[in-house]
Image: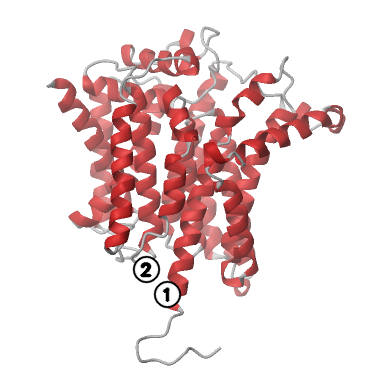
Amino acid sequence: MREAVGLIAVHGGFLAVGAGLLLAAGIVPLRPLALVRAGGLAYLAGIAVVVPLLILLLTLGVPVALPAIVAVFALSALGLVVVGLRREREDEHMPGAAGWAGRIAVAVLGAYLLLATLAFNNLPTIVDDASFWSPKALALLHYDHLQLDVFAGERYVHPDYPILQPLLDATIYRARGGPDLAGRHAELWIVFAAFIAAAAFLVSRAARTRFPLWLPAAGALAVGTGVSANVTLGYADVTLGAFLALGVLCLALWLDGAGRGHLALGAVMLGAAANVKAEGLFLALVALAVAGAVALAQRDRAAGRPWRDPGLRAWAPAALGALAMALPWRLWLKAEGVRNEDVTPLGTALRPSFLIDRADKLREGLEAVAKQLADQGRWSWLFPALLVAAGLALAERAWRHLGVFYLATALGSALLFVGLFWTDTSDPTVPFIASVDRYVTSVVFIAAVALMHLCTRAGSTALADQPEVGEGPRPV
């Protein structure tokens, strides 16, 4: 009984906080049906708010036991709802009901995601899950502070890794009354299912067609073996990919004319991504930098200086806010003298002579990343499809900003991993090649949301170009 009540309470808490954030951002109205449709987005938004706040408390030395967790949930939800009730909605348009064919297709995908949760409910704890993800979660469960031998010592590998994933696990364990290492894989799949629902909700809000044109890309990602293999092994790459891709999608929607609430939500999602894994911060930096560059290119020339442009003035605090979410953990690591021994110092990595001497590693890294991104069995050709879709968008002036943004963000993220391998001095460097199949998860998730967005926008544009009944052909 305690377990069931606890699970309902903690997941309901994430939903409540996330719904408050969506209200505060003006993305959804205070209507039951609208909130239900935004459930997946609200769930992940709640995690993106609550867990970084708990990380902040831990790094400040505040004991994070059940009372503190409940207080963070309650105060976050209350504060965000109050803000949401006092502001106007950005857009009251909500996704309309799909036709019968669309409803059947969405129902099939939903049933698959639901039933798959049962398949991940009793799996062994192995490899990296056993090496550091679950041990860190257990340490956070049994202690209300950061144990130095776990998070700052040499007892476990990757002590520098951010702790959003293990702290999320520990929060759920506290609510249910104890650990469930075999069942945490199901929680990872729930995050993925919420990601699919969240991305579908966001791209559908601006759609003028009822058929779910986002479905092929979402379905391809769901049935590919890449996600299921990652969840089975208990890695955090799916969690990172979910927050990163949703942040990228929100930035793209903002660049495409959505209100600043999408920009704010995107910043929160990218801030959460920066707290999942070490590379999350750099991936978030890539997305924010590309969005800033596109916004700069789109700026109103009549505004004069770039910093006077409303878009750039909105982007700057959002980018700083996202990076600030990663700051508490980084400052705690510095205070405890913990550094990432797996990454070559920046001063060395940028030295031309060092890079030239390792030119063969550049070729190997490019080949390894490209091979994984083109793996049809794992990723259903999502990345090659993005290259085609973005190329077509570049050819259309009204779409060019989206093509540039998605293409530059995806390629920049992929090249980030190539650069890590190029500058890797560990001996041997085989571990990177062996792990590149999961490193590219974030890149493929970006490709998936890009295709969902571009396909839905293409359908809406085509429908808008059709003449009304009784109206002749539109003049060319």
Q: Residue at x 42, y 41 (%)?
A: 222
Q: Position of residue 190 (x, y in %)?
A: 33, 35
Camera-nearest residue between 162 and 433 = 433
Q: Which residue occupies 22% across, 28% down?
A: 7
Front position in the image: 67 or 113: 113
Residue 16, horizontal then vertical, whole percent:
24, 42
Q: Which residue is mark 1?
A: 463
Using residue 356 as the reference point, say whether residue 389 is left or right of it.
left
Q: Secondary structure at mark 2?
A: loop
* On screen, residue 204 above or below 304: above
**Mark 2 and 1 residues: CB-CB less than 8 Å, in contact?**
yes
How far across and how far down the image is residue 394, in percent? 64, 64
Residue 68: quarter of image: top left
- SS at badge 1: helix
Residue hosting label 2: 209
- Can the viewer see residue 257? no
Quadrant of image for the N terminus: top left
In the rendering, at what x and y percent does residue 152 appear? 52, 13
Count residues near mark 1 (Cα–Cα under 10 Å), then give few for <14, some for 14-19, many for 20+. Answer: some
